[in-house]
Image (spheres, rainbow, N blue to C red):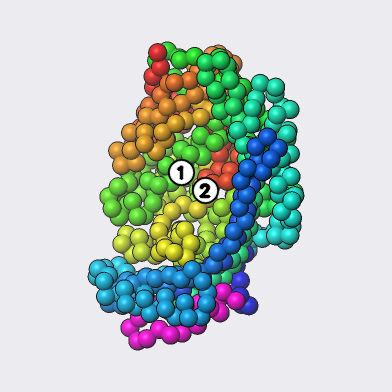
Amino acid sequence: MSARSEGSELLEIADKVIAQATAGEQVEAYVSRDSETAVRVYEGNVEHFVSAQSEGIGIRVIRDGRTGFAYAGTLDQDAVASALAEARDNVAFGTPDEWAGLAEPDGVDIVDQDLWSDELAAFATDRKIELAKELERLTLTADSRVRVDDANYEDVASETAVATTTGIRRSGRENGCYVVVSTLADDGDEAHSGFGFSVGRSPDLFDLHKAARDAADRATRLLGATKPTSRRLTVVLDPYVTASFLSIIGGTLNGESLAKGRSLFKDRLGDEVASPLVTLVDDPTNPLAYTATDIDGEGLAARRNSLIEGGVLRSFVHNSYSARRAGTRSTGNAVRGGFKGTPGVGCLALQLAPGTRDQAALIADVSDGVLVQSVQGLHSGVNPVSGDFSVGASGLLIANGQLGGPVREFTIASTLQRMLLDVVEVGGDVDWLPMRAAGVSLAIRDLTMSGA
C-alpha cells in the first residue's frame, strides 16, 4: 500500500478511537475499506460475477497483560463506539500474557512504492468482463485439443489505517489484478488439467497470449501420460511448484512456529541449512511482487528481510508479539486477514535470488530426471515440524538433457532439509504470481520418485 500519514479519512477514525484510551490502557485501531471484482466466464458467457465492498474497524485493548478485541463491520460512529466498549469488556476474559503489547515505532522508514493504479481504479466493469472472455477465446485457439474449464478476472483494492497509543500512525492504499484460465485436455482415459495467468498493477500489464499458451501447454503436455518406474533422480520444479514449496519453507521460518517449537529450524540461526546457491528473501518492497506493500499489519514499515543467505540461516520473520517472545525485534511481518482479526506472523513476498539460466538450460544438464509440472496434496503430504516431504506429482521425464514422455500418478519424496541442501541450480526465469511467493525453476538432486 502507498503509505500516507496525513489526510486519510480512515486515519482520522483511528485517531479518535485511540484518543479515548484511559490510564494504563494500550489501544490499537485498525481500519480498512476494501473492494473486489471477480468475473468467471464459461463458453463466452458470464457464469459468476461479484463486485463487493466492505469496511470496518478492529480494536485491540491491552491492560495488565490481558488483551480484549472486538470489531465492527461498519464505520458508523455508534458502531465504532460499541466496538471499543466491547473490546474493553473482553479484556476481563483475556488470559494474562507477559509478552502482550502493541507494536512500537522502530525507526525503520517506509520504502516509497507506487502500489496504486489510477488506471485500474477507473477500469470499466464491461472491460473486465471482456478481458476474461478474450482470455477464453485465445486459449481455445491455442490448441484444438483443449477445453476451457473457466476463465477469470479478479481485482482487489484496499485502503488501511493503523493508529496506536504507542505512537504508530500510518495509512496507505494499494490495488492489483490478475487473470487466470483453467484448461482440460482429454486423452480418452483421463482429463489432464492446466492453467495460465497474468498479474499486474493494472490490466494494461497483462499478457493474455502468454497466459493462454501456458494453459494449453500445461494441459496438452500430459496427454498419453504413463506411470513411471520408481528410482532416485533429479527433479526440476516448474516455477509455480517452486512458489508453493517456498510457501512451506516460509512457514517454518515463522516466529510464531518458532515460539511453539514447531519449526524444523529451531536453534539453527547461523547454521548452513541449504545449498550455497540458495538465498531466500522476504521482500514486500519489491513492487513486482503481487503482494508488495509498504506497511505490515501493525503499521510498521515493511522491509526486505534476508532469511537464508548463501545457504546460511540468518533470520526468522516476526511481528511485535513473536519478537518479544524471542527476545528480538519485529521484522515488519505482522499479517492480518482484515479488520475482523488480530495480527499473526507470516512472510509477505518470498523470493529466491534467481540464477542466470532458463528452464531449458537447467534441463539440459540433467541426465535422468523429471520436470514436475504440478503437485497434489502439498500441505497434507508435508510435515513442517519433521520436514518429511511426500507429494503426488505429474510432469515430464528428462533423459540426457531432453524432455521425454509425460508421467503421472507418482510421488516425489525427501525431506525439506535435504531438498534445500540438494539444490543444484536456481533458474533465472522469475514468475510473479498472485500469491505470497514468486516462482522460479529449481533443480534438486536425489529425490525418490515412486511410481510403478
Residue beneath label 1, please? 247
From the viewer's side, name the closer residue of 277 and 220: 220
From the viewer's side, name the closer residue of 303 and 296: 296
Quadrant, the C terminus: top left
The residue located at (73%, 33%) in the rendering is 138
Query: Is-magenta flag for residue 291?
Result: no
Query: Is-magenta flag for residue 21?
Result: yes
Residue beneath label 2, please? 436
Point out the tag, 2 or 1, that comes first from the N-terminus: 1
Q: Is residue 214 left or right of residue 76?
A: right
Which structural element holds mark 1? helix
Question: Picture coordinates of residue 6 (x, y %)?
Answer: 61, 77
Q: Is residue 192 left or right of residue 264?
A: right
Which structural element holds mark 2? loop
Q: Where 179 sits versus 187, above or below?
A: below
Question: Picture coordinates of residue 257 (x, y %)?
Answer: 33, 51
The residue located at (60%, 23%) in the rendering is 185
Q: Amino acid at mark 2?
A: Arg
Magenta region: which residues?
9-27
Q: Where 168 sits versus 191, above or below?
A: below
Q: Amino acid at mark 1?
A: Ser
Q: Residues within 10 Å of mark 2 (few under 14, many from 20)?
A: many
The residue located at (34%, 72%) in the rendering is 68
Q: Are marks 2 and 1 in contact (CB under 8 Å)?
A: yes
